[in-house]
Image: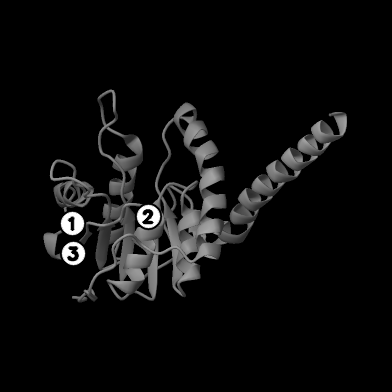
């Protein structure tokens, strides 16, 4: 029994170290391609992919992850760094439509409707990134999200042959970010598994290349 317990501890230790190593590798590999929040980005592209999330918290109030992404995306467009914002999110039910909500809020910030393209099937980051390439015809893009999220998005873009740089939106207070950062450690490891397994977006559909102004 002691031998079995010892092997269990060893295997658990190896698994934990592997998970942490992969997380650290994501940071090392992709941070040079990410502009920090609050800093003007040196990157340009025709299109920026804005990764969706819910606007409202479960207990009420505005989700600051959402609001900060919208603010950063609008700033990116208004500074002339991109021509089109591709907003990608969940539209799993008639009552829940992240892309339309993102479009409305971007327009309130002065982004014209003609500069916003909606992706209704961005159920996961993997879906959003793959569809940007396979459906909307992008080979290069900027990606807007929080710093913890961007390395995974850039990794997934690289796996489909895209060139991508990240533009970070501000993060909420640390007590919110600590929880999602812990979840991201696991999500990065899942991204590796998804790649090894060749997992594809839930819905791909016909090509809809983005027409640039």
Quadrant that contains the C terminus: bottom left
Q: Position of residue 14 (x, y in %)?
A: 75, 45
Q: Secondary structure at mark 1?
A: loop
- The numbered dot on residue 111 is 1
Disc 3 to disc 1: CB gap under 8 Å:
yes
Q: Position of residue 39 (x, y in %)?
A: 44, 52
Q: Secondary structure at mark 3?
A: helix
Q: Position of residue 34 (x, y in %)?
A: 50, 57
Whether residue 150 can be seen here: yes
Residue drawn at (43%, 46%), measured in percent from left and top? 146
Left or right: 36, with 133 as reference point: right
Q: Residues within 10 Å of mark 3 (few under 14, many from 20)?
A: some
In the depicted structure, whether residue 184 falls above or below residue 87: above
Instruction: Name the foreground residue: 148 vs 32.
Output: 148
Quadrant that contains the N terminus: top right
Mark pair 2, 1: CA separation = 15 Å
Q: Residues within 10 Å of mark 1 (few under 14, many from 20)?
A: many
Left or right: 161, with 98 as reference point: right
Residue under label 3, please give it.
115
Residue under label 2, please give it.
144
């Amino acid at each position: 029994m002691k031998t079995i317990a010892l092997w269990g501890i060893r295997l658990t230790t190896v698994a934990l170290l592997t998970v942490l190593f992969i997380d650290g590798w994501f940071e090392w590999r992709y941070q040079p391609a990410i502009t920090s929040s609050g800093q003007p980005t040196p990157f340009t592209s025709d299109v920026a992919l804005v990764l969706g999330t819910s606007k409202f918290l479960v207990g009420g109030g505005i989700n600051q992850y959402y609001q900060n992404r919208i603010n950063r995306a609008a700033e990116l467009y208004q500074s002339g760094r991109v021509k089109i914002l591709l907003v990608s999110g969940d539209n799993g039910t008639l009552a829940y439509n992240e892309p339309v909500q993102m479009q409305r809020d971007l327009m309130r910030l002065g982004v014209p409707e003609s500069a916003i393209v909606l992706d209704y099937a961005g159920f996961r980051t993997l879906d959003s990134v793959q569809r940007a390439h396979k459906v909307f015809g992008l080979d290069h893009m900027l990606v807007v999200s929080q710093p913890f999220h961007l390395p995974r998005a850039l990794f997934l873009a690289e796996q489909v042959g895209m060139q991508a740089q990240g533009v970070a939106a501000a993060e909420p207070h640390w007590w919110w970010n600590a929880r999602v950062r812990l979840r991201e450690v696991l999500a990065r490891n899942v991204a590796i598994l998804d790649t090894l397994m060749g997992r594809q977006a839930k819905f791909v559909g016909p090509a809809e290349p983005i027409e640039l102004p």
